[in-house]
Amino acid sequence: MSDLLQRLRDRGWRLTAQRRVVAEVLDGDHVHYTADEVHAHASQRLPEIARATVYNTLSELVSIGEVIEVSTDGRAKRYDPNAQHAHQHLVCSRCGTIRDVHPIGDPLAALPEGERFGFTVSEATVTYRGLCPNCLVG
């Protein structure tokens, strides 16, 4: 059973067959599928699942904080089930592959007090960019 499925059960979220298959598709390390990719994978398991159902389920998962919506460089939004563990993203500038990374240190501490302009900073998002091994040799 996936960590996401267990978290959803623990919070009493009603797991219909459609919701379950979306959660199962999102299971795994470094999962960052677009909604269309989630739908394609879900359709393999549950052929009658509607695209609208996938979009609605993803929207609900984001709204309850169980999935993170990730946008990089104007590409399609991607959905990250690793919402319970602080992490950043490493993105391939060519193909868009995304990997979760866990850098050492607090990114909030990296912004000096003089650069905060009176803001109370509560969150920092760091995105590392480069070429993945496949694009580097291609």
Image (cartoon, rainbow, N blue to C red):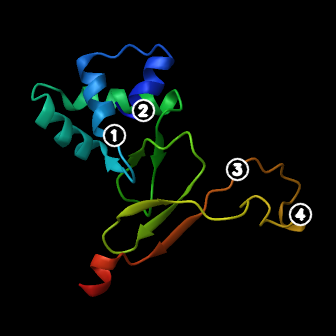
Instruction: Please give the label number shown on residue 26.
Output: 1
Query: Which residue lies at the image location 36% right of the left edge and 75% below the top edge?
Result: 132
Residue pointed to by mark 3: 123
Q: Are marks 4 and 2 in contact (CB under 8 Å)?
A: no
Q: Which amino acid does label 4 sit on?
A: Glu
Query: Of label 3 and label 1, which has the lower sequence position?
Result: 1
Q: Percent position (x, y) of residue 128?
A: 53, 70
Quarter of the C terminus within the rendering: bottom left
Q: Percent position (x, y) of residue 109?
A: 80, 61
Q: Helix, strand or loop at disc 1? A: loop
Query: Of label 4 and label 1, which has the lower sequence position?
Result: 1
Q: Percent position (x, y) of residue 51?
A: 21, 32
Left or right? Give the position of 99 relative to 52: right
Left or right? Give the position of 58 relative to 68: left
Query: Of label 4 and label 3, which has the lower sequence position?
Result: 4
Q: Are marks 1 and 2 in contact (CB under 8 Å)?
A: yes
Q: Percent position (x, y) of residue 86?
A: 60, 49
Q: What residue type is labelled 2?
A: Leu
Query: Of label 4 and label 2, which has the lower sequence position?
Result: 2
Residue pointed to by mark 4: 113
Q: Are marks 3 and 2 in contact (CB under 8 Å)?
A: no
Q: Helix, strand or loop at disc 4? A: helix
**Vertically, is 78 above or below 54?**
below
- Give me the C-alpha separation between circle 4 and circle 3: 14 Å
Residue pointed to by mark 2: 4
Q: Which amino acid does label 1 sit on?
A: Leu
Query: Which residue lies at the image location 27% right of the left edge and 77% below the top edge?
Result: 134
Query: Which residue lies at the image location 75% right of the left edge and 47% below the top edge?
Result: 122
Q: Which amino acid does label 3 sit on?
A: Glu
